[in-house]
Amino acid sequence: MVVDFKIYRACIIACVLILGASLQVGNASTINAFPEAKEMWMSGNLDGAIHQIIKDAEKANSTSDVESLVRAMTLQKEKMDAWVNKARNLIQQKELNDARNALSLAPTISVNYPPYISVLSEIQALEDELKYPKQILFNGKTIEPVFSAYDYDAKLADYGSFENGVLHINIPENHSWGRVGLVSKEPLAVFDSVADKQGYRFEFNFIDRLTSGYVIELDAVDSQADIKITYKPEGNGMASIRLDASSGLSQKAFVSNDKSKRLSLVLYPNQYCYAQMADALRVETSFYSQGTPKKGYLVKVYSQSEKHKLPAQMGLESISMARIPVKTVEPLSNLSDSNTAITLFDGKNFNRQWIPYPRVKHSDMFGNFVTLTKGMLVADVGPKNNWGEVGIGSPEPLIWLDKLDQEGTQIHTTVRFDPEKTTGFSIVAGDINSSWKSPGNKIFMLTWTPLPESQTSQMKLKILNKEVLTEILPITAPSQVTFGFTQGMLSIETDGLEKKSVACPMLVADYGLHMWVTSLAGKKDAPVTMALKEITLNRVIEKKNMTAKVIPPIPPLPVKTLFGADQLKDWECFEGKDRIVDCAMQDKKVNINVSPEEKTIKGIRSKKDVIVLDKRRIDKGRFQIVLAFDPGQTDAFDIGLGKHHVVLKKDADDQYLFSLGDRQRTINTKWLQTQWNGRIMVQLSKLWIKAVLDGSVGIHLFENPKLTMPIVVSSIPPKEISTDGCRMALQMITKQWVMPEDATAAHRWNYVDDEDFNPDEFLRELKGALK
C-alpha cells in the first residue's frame, strides 16, 4: 500500500493537537498549564519541554503536582524513540512497508520531533529507491565501459586492483595527495533545461576500513558550476563530509564511520545538489543557484590522503545512477493568510531556505569553522577572526508579515540555541544586499555576548542601527529568543527577561524579512562558539478587516477611470520599443497575446503622465491604482510605474511569481486559475510602494516612487516567457486618493482634485468644524 505522507502527516498533527490538550495522568496538571513547555513539545523539543515544566514547577514550589505529567511525557518520548529506531532498522533492511507500520505505531506526540522527521525522510528516500530503478555504472569488477582511469597523482594501473568485487586503491607516501580513481568518459548527468522535471541520484558504496579518504566531483563540462564532496576520517570513530561549490558555497558535517559506507548524491537541474549519508545527515548547495550546464557533468571519484604526501587508500564497491522526480516544496512566500507553525531550520539541513554566511569569495569561514552535528549547526571560531561572525542567512525573505495590520494577527519566530555550547550570537532581520555578503538594511539586530568580569552577559537590541534596549542577563547563554511582530512594534522574550516591546516602524503588513543568525565574539579577534538548534515560525492570521476608527465616517474620495473601453484617447498600443499599433479591443478589453516564438514585447501605455503625486496630498495620503484584468484570459503581465514594476509570470518550475521591484512571492496556481478576480491594487506613498494581488498576497517595498509618471502595461520579455507563452486581457484602470485614518471632513478637501474643489461646500464644512 502506498501512503500519501501529506495526508498521513495531517492526521498525525490532528492527533498531536488532541494529545497536547489532554496529556495528563490522574489529577495532575495538564501540559496546557505550561504554555512555554507546550510550545516546545509541539515544535519537537521534547526534552526541553520536560525540563521547562520541572523548572516552572520549581519556581512555583509545586514539583509534586507535575511528577505524574513528567513521567507520562518521558514515557511518551521513550516510546517514540523506540519505534523510530525500529523503523530505521527496517529501512536499512529495505523493508519499506514494515518501516511504515513501525512509524505509524509511534506515539503521536510531535510531528516536529527531529528523529521522527529524519526517519520519515528516510522512508521517502527508500520508496524513491524502490520505485526508480538503478543503472549500475560500476560493479567493482571493471571500470569499463562507463569510466576510464583518473591518473592525477599516480597511475591507477600501478596502484589499483580488483578483489572480491571491490576496487582497491593503495597509494604509497610521497605521491602528493594520492588522487587516483575513475572519471566518466562522457557526461553522466545531462539536463534538457533548468525546467527539467527529473534529477539524478548517484549512490557510491565504499568499504570504510579500506578507505582513508575520498573525493567525488561533479565536473561541469561547459561552465564553472563544479561541485565537490570530500570525505575525511577525523579520529575517534568520526569522519567529516564536506561539500564545496564553485559559487563559493561550502558546508561540512560530521558522521560516524559506521554510517559512511554509502553516500547518496542528488543533483537537480538548477544546480541544487546534496550529499547524504546513511543517517540522513546531509550537506547541500544553495537552492537558489540558477541555470544548468548545457553539456552536463562528468563524474569523478578518487582517493585522497589525509595530509599531503601521506599514503592514500580507497575501497570502492559500486556506483549506481537513477533518474528521480524533482521534488517541490511549498514556498514560504505563498503562506498568505494561512495559520501555520513550521520549522525554518531544523539544525541539520538548509531546507533550500538558507545559505552559508558570510558569502565572500576567497574566504571560507563557514567551511573552516562550522559543522552540522548532533542536530545542531555548531560554529567554533578561533581567535584573530575579527568578530567571528559566521552562520546562516536567507537569500529570500522567510518571514512575511501578511495581514499584520489586521487586529488579531500574531506572527512569532523563535531561535533556539544550546546554551552549553554558545558564547555569543547575533540575530538580524532586514533586507539583503545584492551580493548576499551581508545584511543590507538591518531593520532590527539582537546581540548577546558574555561579560566574564562580572559573571553576567549583555543583550542589546538595535532598530535601524539605533540602540533601543540593553539588558544585563545571567552569564549562561539563552536557550531561545522569541520575536513577536505586530504593526509597527517588535517584542522579544528570552530566558531571564520578561517580554519587552519596542517601536519598529518598518514592521508593516505584507513586508518580507530576510534573516541571519551568526556567532558573535564579545571582543574583536576573540574566540567564539554558537550552537544553533532550531528556528521556528508561528502565524495566526486574522482574516477580518480592522474596524475603522474614523468618527464620524467620512465618505471616500471618488474613484476615477484612467483607462476603459470608453477612454482610449489617452492610450496607445505598441509592439517592440517604438512601433505603435491599433489596440485590439474585444468585449470591452484589450487583448495582448504573445506566443513563445515571438521575440518582441507587446503592450499598452498612457500617452502622458497619468500619475501625479503632488506634495499637498502625498505627504500624508496615498494614491491607489486598481487594474482589472480578465482572469480567465490573463496569466502574465508587467505593470510599469516609473522605475518600479509589478509583475506576474510563470517561472521555469511552472510556478506563478508575483513581484514588486526585487521582491517576489510564489502564487498558488490553483487559486490563481480558479479564484482570482483579476484585480491588482497598487498604492503609492511618500516613502513606500505596495502591490496586492486581490484576495491573495501583497508586497510592501520601502522605496520612494516618482512624483509623475505614465503607466505601461506590457507582456513579459520573451526571455522570461514560459514555454506556454503569455496572455493578458486588460479591462480597466482606475485611480483614487486615499486619506489618512485620522482625516476629518475638513481635511477631505485637501485631497480632492483641483477640478472637483467646491469653495462653498468647503467653507460650510469648515464653519461646522470650528463650531
Image: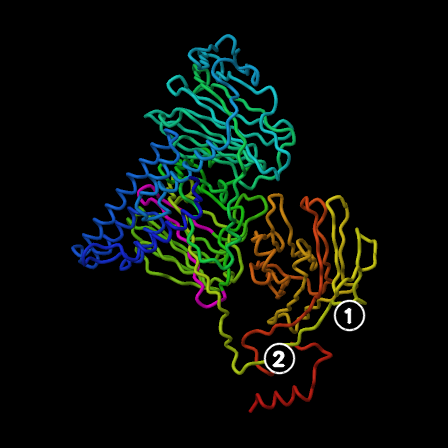
In the rendered image, residue 43 lying in the magenta stretch gets the answer: no
Above or below for 305 versus 444: above
Q: Nearer the viewer, residue 165 or 573?
A: 165
Name the residue furthest top.
158
Above or below for 643 versus 725: below
Q: Nearer the viewer, residue 590 or 422?
A: 590
Is 425 on the left or on the right of 680, as rendered? left
Name the residue furthest left.
64
Q: Nearer the viewer, residue 230 or 634?
A: 634
| Label 2 element class | helix
Tell us which disc is closer to us: 1 or 2: 1
| Label 1 element class | loop
Amino acid type shown at disc 2: Arg
Q: Which residues are magenta?
A: 405-428
Residue 6: % across, % down: 44, 47
| Mark 1 / mark 2, whichever is N-terminal | 1
Q: Nearer the viewer, residue 282 or 29?
A: 29
Q: Let me know if residue 453 appears in the view.
A: no
Q: Let me know if residue 34 appears in the view.
A: yes
Residue in view at x 44 percent, y 55 percent: 340
Q: How many marks?
A: 2
In terms of image quadrants, where is residue 660?
bottom right
Question: Within 10 angstroms of label 2, few (less than 14), some, or many (20 or more) residues?
Answer: some
Is 536 on the left or on the right of 76, as rendered? right
Above or below for 456 versus 708: above
Q: Residue under circle 2?
A: 748
Distance between the alpha carbons at the discs numbered 1 and 2: 29 Å
Q: If the image is split into quadrants, where does the N terminus sit?
A: top left
Residue in view at x 43 percent, y 16 percent: 313
Residue 74: % across, % down: 24, 46
Q: Residue under circle 1?
A: 566
